[in-house]
Image: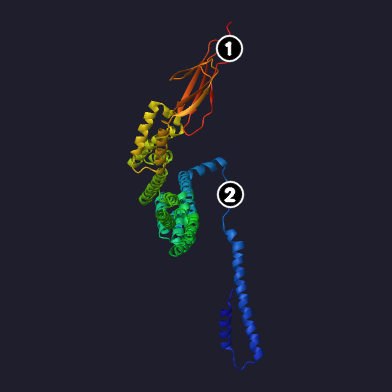
Amino acid sequence: MVSDESVNKAEQIISLNFDKKHSFFQKVLLGLHLRNILISALLMVLFIVLYLVIFWLPSSVKPIYSTIDAKEIMAQDASKPIDESPWRESQLAKHRRDAQEILSLVLEKQKNLEDKKVTFWANETFEAALKTAESGDYYYRSQEFSSAMASYQNTLKQLINIEASIPEQFGEFLAQGKLALKENNANLAKEKLQVAMYMQPNDSKASSAFDRALVLDQVLALVKIGTVFVEDRQYKAAKSSFEQAYQLDKRSVIVNEQLQQVNELIVDRDYSLAMSSGYKNLQGNKYNQALVFFNQAKQIKPTSVPVVQAIKQSKNERMQAKISLKFEQAQERIQQENWSKALDKYNEILLLDKSLLQAQIGILKSTARLTLSDKLNNYIDYPARLSNKNVYQQALFTKQDAMNIDHPGEKLLLQIKSINQLMIKVKVPLLVNIKSDNQTMVTLYRSGQLGKFLAKELSLTPGEYTLVGSRDGFRDVRQAFILYADKSHPTIVIQCSERVTRG
């Protein structure tokens, strides 16, 4: 087909042969005539080509006519060489299958590594392996299957090596993440630990560390707040802040350190306050209150040597105070000449401390004075006993012991005076009137017979006496009586009035 440019050139050439004197209309007609001639020539050429293709070319091919039978044809075909190569094609098919099998393993490894985000931790080696696989594709397309298999096997080996490096790579990224955690770098920790989790999603260590990295910024903010409270000595508020951080990350080193530190500060504060209160009460002789505070301090610091010493000191001072008080009470009882109560106090002292010699001496002294006092009181309360010579002699010895006491008290002096008066009076005879029936034989026990009489007057010293009456045919009678000094005595009647029956 003629182009517009050729037409234009032709028009230009044609226009160059025109006489300039021709009219405009003539020029137009002449131009149209020349264009039609050129188009017609081109159409004629195309028609001739078409004719040759459709009619001449088929007729130029000589037809083949079958002039022999089928056996001859088969014989002729057998004698001709075959272009096909079954062995080669089967080998190619086998290599193609082998290459595809290796390629499927390559694709499986590729997917596994891509699932583990291999580009984050082994991008260069992974890309190199993929390029090796691309060269294998080139050989495969060229039906060079042996070379393709070698490339694929090399790729598979590279991918297996990458996969085998996962534990080591995981360990490195986990270590880097933990180090970032330790250095309080939250972003770096999350980045490294995320890659580690891509490699081993089910690893608890990586998961735990990643969880810690997610809350690290919150933890650090709470630690900062708690530190400010510590500086202001607001330990309770600081502990609350650190405990909140601890709930977010129980394994954080800085949180555990700060929490331990604030707990130690609280312990020291409470311990100092308890010890101070204990010593304050100890100085005020408030031993029980002091022990309460010292025991509180011991609960706070069980192994504290000062608190053990303070408790021991408090108990010793309390013991000494108790002992001193009981000594004072015993002394008061001694001043009161209440020897029984004094003895009780000395026994109480020995229960507190049995090694106290002063209490042992006090017990001996109190026991002796109590015994002396009881003897004197026994004579004073029962003066009639003094009529007995032996008793009188014992009373005399007892009185002498009392008089030998240094610095006797008023009570003892009064007892000495009383026993002395009684011993004098016991020697003064008293007149006693005795009546009988003149039939009864009357005998004064341990003195002798008085005989039979109606009335008799006896002169007897104070004491205890017994009259015995006897009469034939009658039951004996006894009449006991006591003579008290300075006391009037009724008339004593003694006679036998109850007959004895004889059966």
Quarter the N terminus occupies: bottom right
Q: Amino acid at mark 1?
A: Arg
The reply to whether residue 142 is in sight is no
Q: Residue at x 37, y 33 (%)?
A: 398
Q: Residue at x 35, y 44 (%)?
A: 407
The reply to whether residue 16 is in sight is yes
311, 200: nearer the viewer: 311
Residue underneath mark 2: 65
Which image quarter: residue 362?
top left
Residue underneath mark 1: 499
Quarter the C terminus occupies: top right
Which image quarter: residue 55?
bottom right
39, 151: nearer the viewer: 151
Tell me where residue 38 appears, x and y as whole percent: 60, 78
Q: Amino acid at mark 2?
A: Tyr
Tell me where residue 47 appears, x and y as whole percent: 62, 69
Q: Residue furthest top?
A: 503
Q: Secondary structure at mark 2?
A: loop
211, 157: nearer the viewer: 211
The residue mark sitting in front, 1 or 2, is: 1
Q: Secondary structure at mark 1?
A: loop
